[in-house]
């Protein structure tokens, strides 16, 4: 689970709230409201990345809300809560779900993804199974996954959730190229 920014001028601390599976949407809603009442605004990882790279501004008190794909079953309720509170989130979907949706294009997963308002919930890629030590295999697999993600979701992956610190800098370069 890594984000790499090579910008030494980045000094802001941004809380990242990670929700695995939200079982109680009303509790989630009360948490979102409480955070907003305390003066925070929610931004996406993409907005944070633009700020870090010097291509955008973010409010003074911000937080990032990260959702795991386990929330796809509640996504309509979660999205409604976010819209009502003018909040945003980033949903990370696992590559294996993208592969499965290629086989079954009418899948529940694909239908749910198509219903997401991308101005409220930014969809990004989770590649937690990529534990290669061979650089050329890693590059080929990452490029394939980024391409498949773009074809399935309809936008380019700008933030990647992965567990391979061996290739942090390489991953950043490839993601920018794709």
Image (spheres, rainbow, N blue to C red):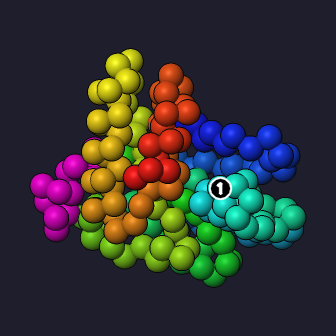
Query: How many tags in the picture?
Result: 1
Q: Which quadrant holds the N terminus? A: top right
Q: Magenta part of the protein: which range? A: 96-107
Q: Is residue 16 above or below residue 137?
A: below
Q: Which residue is mark 1?
A: 49
**Secondary structure of the magenta portion, mostly?**
helix
Residue at horizontal 69 percent and vertical 49 percent from the top: 16
Residue at horizontal 49 percent and vertical 33 percent from the top: 170
Q: Whole-percent x and y of residue 137?
A: 29, 27
Q: Residue furthest left?
A: 103
Instruction: Pick whichever, 174 or 35, lies toward us.
Output: 174
Seen in the image, is 54 located left or right of residue 123? right
Residue at horizontal 37 percent and vertical 24 percent from the top: 135
On whether residue 106 falls in the magenta region, the answer is yes
Residue 16 visible in the current orientation: yes
SS for callout 1: helix
Instruction: Pick whichever, 57 or 32, lies toward us.
Output: 57
Q: Whole-percent x and y of residue 118?
A: 48, 73
Seen in the image, is 137 located left or right of residue 77? left
Residue at horizontal 38 percent and vertical 18 percent from the top: 133
Q: Whole-percent x and y of residue 31?
A: 71, 61
Number of residues whose C-alpha sits closer than 10 Å to that of mark 1, classed few (under 14), some (14–19) or many (20 or more): some
On whether residue 99 falls in the magenta region, the answer is yes
């Amino acid at each position: 689970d890594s984000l790499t920014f090579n910008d030494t001028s980045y000094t802001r601390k941004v809380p990242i709230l990670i929700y695995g599976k939200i079982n109680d949407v009303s509790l989630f809603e009360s948490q979102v409201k409480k955070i907003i009442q305390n003066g925070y605004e929610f931004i996406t990882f993409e907005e944070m990345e633009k700020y870090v790279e010097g291509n955008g501004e973010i409010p003074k008190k911000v937080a990032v809300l990260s959702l795991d794909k386990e929330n796809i079953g509640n996504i309509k309720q979660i999205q409604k809560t976010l819209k009502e509170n003018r909040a945003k989130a980033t949903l990370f979907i696992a590559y294996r779900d993208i592969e499965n949706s290629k086989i079954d294009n009418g899948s529940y997963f694909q239908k749910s993804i198509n219903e997401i308002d991308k101005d409220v919930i930014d969809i990004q890629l989770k590649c937690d199974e990529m534990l290669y030590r061979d650089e050329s295999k890693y590059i080929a697999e990452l490029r394939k996954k980024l391409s498949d993600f773009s074809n399935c979701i309809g936008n380019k992956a700008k933030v990647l959730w992965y567990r391979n610190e061996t290739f942090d800098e390489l991953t950043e370069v490839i993601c920018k190229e794709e």
